[in-house]
Image: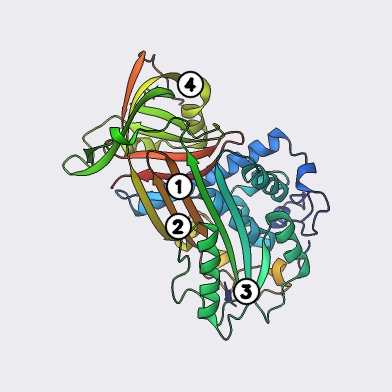
Amino acid sequence: MGRCPARGRGLRDTSARYKGSGPERFLPDLAPSSEPAACLGASAFTMEQLSSANTRFALDLFLALSENNPAGNVFISPFSISSAMAMVFLGTRGNTAAQLSKTFHFNTVEEIHSRFQRLNADINKRGASYILKLANRLYGEKTYNFLPEFLASTEKTYGAVLTSVDFQHAPEDARKTINQWVKGQTEGKIPELLASGVVDNMTKLVLVNAIYFKGNWQEKFLKEATTDAPFRLNKKDTKTVKMMYQKNKFPFGYIEDLKCRVLELPYQGKELSMVILLPDETDDESMGLKKVEEQLTLEKLREWTKPENLSSIEVNVSLPRFKLEESYTLNSDLARLGVQDLFDSSKADLSGMSGARDIFISKIVHKSFVEVNEEGTEAAAATAGIATYCMLMPEENFTADHPFFFFIRHNSSGSILFLGRFSSP
């Protein structure tokens, strides 16, 4: 966040209170809540609102990234990005707040910050059958004065404590400190979130969100069944992959209008699942995936993947063993989606952080990692017309030997933690 007047108000549980018809109606209320997360009593309706908002943003960003890279791999944690930007939203005012609210669909969720607080607690709960760590932290220039209300709210709602660092005199040391923390939170999978030169002596604040996931399949693939097999990148090129195989009962569906198979692979405990959309092969360069992506909306994705449209049947599953590591600077993509003032030193209003309009967001960096193997999945990330279904056969084949779309979902909330496109081993 770089250098570049209105005093900030402070987040109660009623953080999305109506404030008139102008952009200020989106402003969070920054006084910290005294109510513990367990007592928030978020209704299923409002948690559904948050899940819908996060999924809409996830698909918006995925499609924007896909336009930039139509034939390559894409992998992001939209939940990580939304969580980080919700922290930023706490400190925004005026048009900056309105743009963030619209792009991230925060304006569709009542009490947005308390809902994130509740969802973070649900996802990070103790005793889960998976390992999922979501961690937030603020790194602030030690000589810069942040509003106590802002710091109290980020700590109370997002668990993000402020660590003072010396950006002004030792930016490289500060960068290494941030990277070391992210490396620890992601079990070493993201060793360098911030590249050399990303922070400098003008940096005032770095907001970091890191998410790490490791889960075993409910039904594991047998290692001895893994073989070398061709993966079709497009209609003329192939590449050899390690193809895993198993035959088991899984939720499965076929979208007749799209000519696309849907498979749900639950993780142990069935609290999380990987859902894969695999188009039938076609002669286009994307092997059928482009048509699926063109149809992606919140409503259609939910229709395609909801339990009542999937049948638990025997499926011969062939899935590549794969690992993806992706890095994105999201400024231009978010600007295309509507977040513009945040990155403009002359327009950014982050006065809810400091009481002055003297800072702006210089860069949003997102790195992500996923590894899928016979045991399960390891993933990490850090940010700075309804189709008709056809009748299924008693046994189906699901051979992912060409590009597919996938996401990892927290089933009880419907929240998409990670999503991507696997196009090229």
Pick whichever of labels 2 and 3 is earlier in the sequence: 2
- Mark 2 burial class by Cα count in 10 Å: few <14, some 14-19, many 20+: many
Image quadrant assignment for residue 138: bottom right
Give the amino acid at mark 4. Answer: Asn
**Mark 1, residue position:** 378
**Mark 4, residue position:** 309
Give the foreground label among 3 and 4: 4
Identity of the residue drawn at 32% across and 49% down? 70
Please report contact status of discs 3 and 4: CB closer than 8 Å, yes or no.
no
Identity of the residue drawn at 34% across and 49% down? 73
Pick whichever of labels 3 and 1 is earlier in the sequence: 3
SS for dot 2? loop
Please identify the residue farthest to the bottom as the structure is shown.
Answer: 169
Q: CA distance from mark 2 to mark 3?
A: 31 Å
SS for dot 3? strand
Q: CA distance from mark 2 to mark 4?
A: 36 Å
**Mark 3, residue position:** 359
Circle number at residue 222: none
- Mark 1 burial class by Cα count in 10 Å: few <14, some 14-19, many 20+: many
Q: CA distance from mark 4 to mark 1?
A: 28 Å
